[in-house]
Image: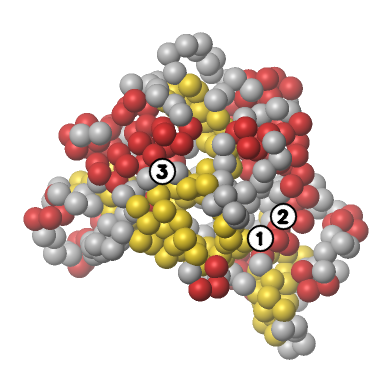
C-alpha cells in the first residue's frame, strides 16, 4: 500500500490526530491525554518522523497504560502480504466489529483496501441481536475477527452459527480459547483460525489455518510468511520481521526483533503455543502458576461471564491464587465452580473468589488486569470478602 493511500485511510477513520506529520490513532480519551502531554512536553520530532514510523497506534495491553507503537506503509504492507500468502486469499472482504483505533480493526480496513475487497463495519450488538449482514457470493473471501466471548455467545444461536459457516476464516484472538469453546466451534464446523499478534507487530504474526483447527489442532499456528518467531531464555516469545514496529512514539528503535512478555513453546512443525505471561506468574507455595491455566479451567465451568486470576500477598503461601469476577450481571455458583476445578492441581485452585464492582474493560471487552488487582486487593484488605 502506498503512503498516501494509507494516510487517507487512517484519516477517514475519524479517530486519528495529526501533529508534525505524525498520525496518532487511538480512542478519544487516550488521544486527549496525549494532547495534554504534548502541550506540556513538546517532544522533539526529526525529519525522519514523516518517513519511518509516522503512524502511531495506541496500545495499552492489559496494564491500562497507553503507549503508541510506530508503524508506516512498509510495516503494514508486509503484514498484509504475509496474511494473504498464509491464508491463500487474493481479495479480502471483512465484516468488522472492532473499532478503527484497535490494530485488528485498522488492519481489517487495510487488508480490504490493499486487495480491493469490501470492508463492512458493523456493530457487535446488532450481530448479537440477529442483525447480520449478508455475505455476497463471489468477488473474494469473507473474514471476521472475534474475541473468545463473542464466539461463545454466537454459538448459542443456530442462525449465527449458520452465518459464521459462510466465512473463509473466523479469526479468534485477544485472549485464550478454553477447550470446551474450541470443541463446540469444531462440532459446529466453524472455520476458526486461532491467532497470535499485537499492536507492535501490525496484528497477527502466527495463525492456525481453519483446516488445522477442524482437525483438532489448538495452537496459535505457524508464523506467517512475513514473520519470524523464536524463543528466548525461559520460553519468552521473540518476533522478528518487516511488520515489527519502529519503537514507541516519540522514540525510535531500529532493531527488527521484539521481545514480548509472553511465554510459549514451538512444536516440531513450528506451531506456537502460548503458555502465559512472564510478568503474570504467581508463585504460591514455591510453585509457579500461570493465571491463564486457571482462567481456562474456571471458564470451562460455564459459571463465569468473565474472570481474571491474580496473585495476592499471603503469609502462608507467599502469594495466594485469587479469582476475580464482575459484580454486575450473572453471578457464578461458587460451589459448582469448586466442584468443576477439583481436577486442578492444588496449587492452581483459587483460594478466594472476589467480586469486583465496575469491572474495568475497554470497548473490546479487554480487561485492565492492573485495575482488577487494585480493586481486589482493596476488597481483600477490607471487611468484605468472598472466599471458599
Identify the residue at the far left of this view.
47
Q: Give the residue number, with chain letter if any, for mark 3.
A: 225
Left or right: residue 365 compared with residue 336: left
> Does the rendering let one see residue 386?
no
Q: Is residue 61 above or below residue 10?
A: below
Residue sitting at 47 percent across and 11 percent down? 138
Query: Between tags 2 and 3, which lies in front?
Result: 3
Mark 2 residue element: helix
- Distance, label 2 to label 1, CA atoms, is 6 Å
Q: In the image, which disc is placed on residue 261?
A: none
Q: Give the residue number, with chain letter if any, for mark 2.
A: 296
Residue sitting at 30 percent across and 39 percent down? 77
Left or right: residue 322 compared with residue 234: right
Count neighbours of disc 3 (C-alpha within 10 A) and say few if under 14, some if 14 to 19, many if 20 or more: some
Q: Nearer the viewer, residue 131 or 197?
A: 197
Residue sitting at 22 percent across and 31 percent down? 5
- Distance, label 2 to label 3, CA atoms, is 30 Å
Q: Give the residue number, with chain letter if any, for mark 1.
A: 292
The quadrant where residue 315 appears: bottom right
Kindly check if marks 2 and 1 are in contact, taking CB atoms under 8 A apart as contact: yes
Residue sitting at 75 percent across and 39 percent down? 183
Q: Nearer the viewer, residue 299 or 331?
A: 299
Q: Quadrant of the C terminus?
A: bottom right
Count neighbours of disc 1 (C-alpha within 10 A) and say few if under 14, some if 14 to 19, many if 20 or more: many
Amino acid at each position: 500500500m502506498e503512503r498516501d493511500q494509507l494516510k487517507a485511510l487512517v484519516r477517514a477513520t475519524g479517530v486519528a490526530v495529526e501533529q508534525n506529520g505524525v498520525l496518532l490513532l487511538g480512542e478519544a480519551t487516550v488521544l486527549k491525554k496525549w494532547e495534554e502531554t504534548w502541550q506540556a512536553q513538546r517532544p522533539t520530532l526529526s525529519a525522519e518522523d514523516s518517513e519511518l514510523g509516522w503512524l502511531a497506534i495506541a496500545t495499552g495491553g492489559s496494564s491500562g497504560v497507553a503507549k503508541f507503537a510506530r508503524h508506516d506503509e512498509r510495516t503494514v504492507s508486509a503484514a498484509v502480504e504475509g496474511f494473504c500468502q498464509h491464508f491463500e486469499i487474493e481479495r479480502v472482504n471483512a465484516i468488522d466489529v472492532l473499532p478503527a483505533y484497535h490494530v485488528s480493526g485498522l488492519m481489517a480496513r487495510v487488508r480490504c483496501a490493499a486487495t480491493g475487497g469490501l470492508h463492512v463495519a458493523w456493530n457487535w450488538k446488532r450481530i448479537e441481536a440477529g442483525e447480520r449482514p449478508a455475505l455476497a457470493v463471489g468477488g473474494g473471501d469473507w473474514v471476521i475477527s472475534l474475541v473468545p466471548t463473542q464466539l461463545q455467545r454466537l454459538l448459542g444461536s443456530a442462525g449465527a452459527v449458520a452465518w459464521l459457516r459462510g466465512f473463509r476464516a473466523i479469526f479468534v484472538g485477544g485472549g485464550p480459547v478454553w477447550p470446551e469453546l474450541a470443541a463446540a466451534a469444531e462440532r459446529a464446523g466453524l472455520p476458526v483460525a486461532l491467532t497470535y499478534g499485537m499492536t507492535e507487530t501490525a496484528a497477527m504474526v502466527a495463525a492456525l489455518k481453519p483446516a488445522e483447527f477442524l482437525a483438532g489442532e489448538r495452537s496459535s499456528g505457524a508464523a506467517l510468511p512475513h514473520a519470524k518467531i523464536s524463543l528466548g531464555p525461559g520460553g519468552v516469545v521473540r518476533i522478528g520481521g518487516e511488520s515489527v514496529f519502529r519503537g514507541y512514539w516519540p522514540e525510535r528503535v531500529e532493531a527488527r526483533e521484539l521481545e514480548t512478555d509472553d511465554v510459549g513453546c514451538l512444536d516440531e512443525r513450528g506451531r506456537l503455543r502460548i503458555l502465559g505471561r512472564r510478568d503474570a506468574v504467581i508463585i504460591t507455595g514455591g510453585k509457579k502458576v500461570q493465571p491463564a491455566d486457571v482462567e481456562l479451567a474456571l471458564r470451562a465451568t460455564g459459571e463465569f461471564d468473565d474472570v481474571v486470576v491474580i496473585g495476592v500477598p499471603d503469609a502462608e503461601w507467599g502469594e495466594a491464587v485469587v479469582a476475580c469476577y464482575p459484580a454486575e450481571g450473572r453471578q457464578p455458583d461458587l460451589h459448582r465452580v469448586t466442584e468443576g476445578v477439583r481436577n486442578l492441581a492444588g496449587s492452581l485452585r483459587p483460594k478466594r473468589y472476589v467480586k469486583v464492582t465496575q469491572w474495568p474493560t475497554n470497548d473490546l471487552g479487554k480487561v485492565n488486569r492492573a485495575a482488577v488487582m487494585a480493586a481486589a486487593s482493596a476488597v481483600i484488605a477490607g471487611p468484605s470478602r468472598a472466599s471458599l
